[in-house]
Amino acid sequence: MSTSKSYTFTLADQEAFSEISRDFNVQHLNREQSRRLFFGDVVVHGINTVLRALDLFANEFDGYVNMNFITMEFSKPTYLGMETTFVLEQVGDNESRILVKNTIGEVVTNILINPEKDAVVFYQDPEQLDQLKLKDLGSFCYLEDSKKKFVEYYPNLSLLNWQRAQMFLGSTYLVGMVYPGVNSIFLTACIEFSNSSSLISEQLNYKLISEDNRFGMVTMSIENESSVVIIEAFKRPEKKEQPKMEVVLARSINKKLEGKRVLVIGGSRGLGELAVKISVAQGAEVLFSYRSGKNDADRIVADVGGGADCFSWNSDEPIFDKILEFNPTHVYYMATPYIFNKKSTVFVNEIFENFHNVYNLCFNKLVENLINQNTHVRFFWPSTVAIDENTNTLCEYVMAKTAGERLVHYLDKKYKNISIYTERLPKLETDQTVTLGESEATDSLDYFIEFTNRFLNE
């Protein structure tokens, strides 16, 4: 027997929850900054999905007065603007499960209420922790204002003891703001409640239990006088910054682009940013686009010290006036959605359509707008070695790139006043390819300098 309900998280939810929990990690609030972090976009606080689930099913549990033990496992991120499904299942006489699923049916969060402790793989006995010398991470107290906002935001949790609510909120504050902090991924949590209803102090005490630097995993605890939380989290990889212009200029780079005009579509980060800097170093006048990263684009313009300008451009509604006025001789088409944020082996048409629109349909429009220019235009359209690999989780991406290779071939043959060069690029070091643990990405600057020579000499 199961019951389902749904909810769609918005940025307003993020802001409200941050005010309650005091977890203001940019990954949950700032679209421009989070686009360059591990998940590629703003993601919902894991604890917010748990509390929203408890709020939706509160009538099934009589205010959770009999909830003595709860575990949560966050296997995938929850994104804004996408309908999230909550499925309540009765597992045993006193045990329940809530599965939180995304729009394509993947379980993103697994919540167990009153499970058998021996069956929880990541459970650690608090009494055994008392025998260890744990590192103190400080303490925290929630103010009365947070309690008031909590009841307003979760109206059905008004009967949930505030002492218990603080253990949830304190967990996200610890991970997002204390340790690991800005670069963090919440993995699991177990909360064990006592039946005590009176506290002398509401102070939450944070401790570091263990840390594995090989994988960036940390285990921590939160305690007050009546409850304890055991948390597992990852240190999220820091965003990848491309080399500054002074580093690019220090390399042996030819001046093959002197007197040329280079357009870079998608030049505010990653390989597009490298294309901008290397082209300026090669003597070109450069114009590059950004979609949402205006601050990043302005930073690049300042870094190259002249020779480059930027403009806002959206592949969903592309406008070509500024591009036609610039009249480029060379075009790097580096626009890309976030590639790795959907790790499903199931084909999802919406994901494919997004890739196909950005990589292929919009590129075709760009070519058609430039074929009537008086200048011969040399294009670069990047493909990927993932086409040659058995990468089930990148199915939609690979399909779009495979279709794009055929499109590029036809366009190159059809129009005589353009030429299009494509190459299957390996996994290069960008903010899209950062991973937990060791990275197998190739140094992007070394590769891209060699690549530009192939592109310009083809």
Image (cartoon, rainbow, N blue to C red):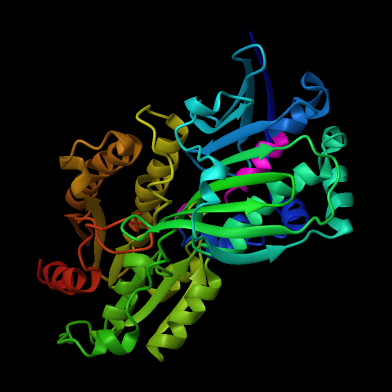
Identified at 44% across, 37% down, the residue is 351
The residue lying toward the viewer, choosing from 86 and 286, is 86
Identified at 58% across, 65% down, the residue is 137
Q: Can residue 243 be seen from the camera position used here? A: yes
Q: Can residue 41 be seen from the camera position used here? A: no
The residue lying toward the viewer, choosing from 215 and 196, is 196
Residue 39 covered by magenta stretch: yes
Quadrant in which residue 71 is drawn: top right
Quadrant of the snapshot with the N terminus: top right
Report the magenta residues as a range.
38-52
Identified at 48% across, 75% down, the residue is 297
Image position, residue 203 (x, y; %): 76, 59
Q: Is residue 21 left or right of residue 69?
A: right
Q: Is residue 192 left or right of residue 399?
A: right
Quadrant in which residue 348 is drawn: top left
Q: Against 154, is 180 above or below?
A: below
Image position, residue 76 (x, y; %): 48, 40
In the picture as drawn, the residue positioned furthest to the top comes out as: 1
Quadrant in which residue 27 is drawn: bottom right
Image position, residue 160 (x, y; %): 82, 36
Q: Against 305, is 84 above or below?
A: above
Q: Against 102, is 286 above or below?
A: below
Image position, residue 406 (x, y; %): 21, 41
The residue lying toward the viewer, choosing from 376 and 244, is 244
Q: Against 193, is 212 above or below?
A: below
Quadrant of the snapshot with the C terminus: bottom left
In the picture as drawn, the residue positioned furthest to the front comes out as: 131
Identified at 65% across, 45% down, the residue is 228
